[in-house]
Image (cartoon, rainbow, N blue to C red):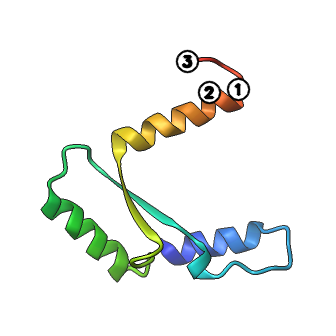
Amino acid sequence: MKDVTLKRIRDAQATSHQIDENDIMWVVTVPGMAKDAAKSFMRKAATGAGMGGRHNLMLALEPEAAALCVKGIMKTSNTRA
């Protein structure tokens, strides 16, 4: 998944500057009810898959991520909540 994502980003770039893996903030969503052990597992799995490390990997709770996504869509479409 990481390699496919990086390839798509690099292919879509309109500039000559190539993105480095360290330029990316990886965000992995976890269920809102996830216990600490599940969050730790997801962090280790993402790190093991090469998706960032201590400084460029973030876990986000799914309900919060969904709310931010909807807020962005509404802002883009000039619709008020």
Residue 2 in the image, given as x and y percentages of width and height: 50, 74
Which of pointers 1 and 3 indicates the residue nearer the eye? 3
Q: Alpha-carbon distance for marks 1 and 3? A: 11 Å
What is the crowding at mark 3: few (fewer than 14 residues within 10 Å), some, or many (at least 20)? few
Neighbour class for label 1 at 10 Å: few (<14), some, many (≥20)?
A: few
Residue position marked by numbered label 1 in the rendering = 77
Residue 36 % position (x, y) = 16, 59
> For the residue marked with disc 3, what is the amino acid?
Ala
| Residue 39 to residue 7: above or below | above
Q: Quadrant of residue 18?
A: bottom right
**Mark 3 near mark 2, Cβ–Cβ under 8 Å?**
yes
Residue that lies at the very extreme toward the top in this rendered image: 80
Rounded to the nearest whole Å, what is the CA distance between mark 1 and mark 2? Answer: 5 Å
Q: How many marks?
A: 3
Q: Which residue is mark 2?
A: 74
CB-based contact (under 8 Å), mark 1 and mark 3 = no
Question: Is 78 placed left or right of 51 in the picture?
Answer: right
Residue 78 vs 41, above or below: the answer is above
Tell me the SS state at disc 1.
loop
User: Is there a contact, CB below 8 Å, between mark 1 and mark 2?
Assistant: yes
Residue 3, quarter of picture:
bottom right
> Which residue corresponds to mark 3?
81
Q: Quadrant of the C terminus?
A: top right
Name, please, the residue furthest toward the front. 55
The location of residue 50, given as percent across then percent down, is 43, 81
Answer with left or right where residue 43 lies relative to residue 23.
left
Q: Nearer the viewer, residue 7 or 26?
A: 26
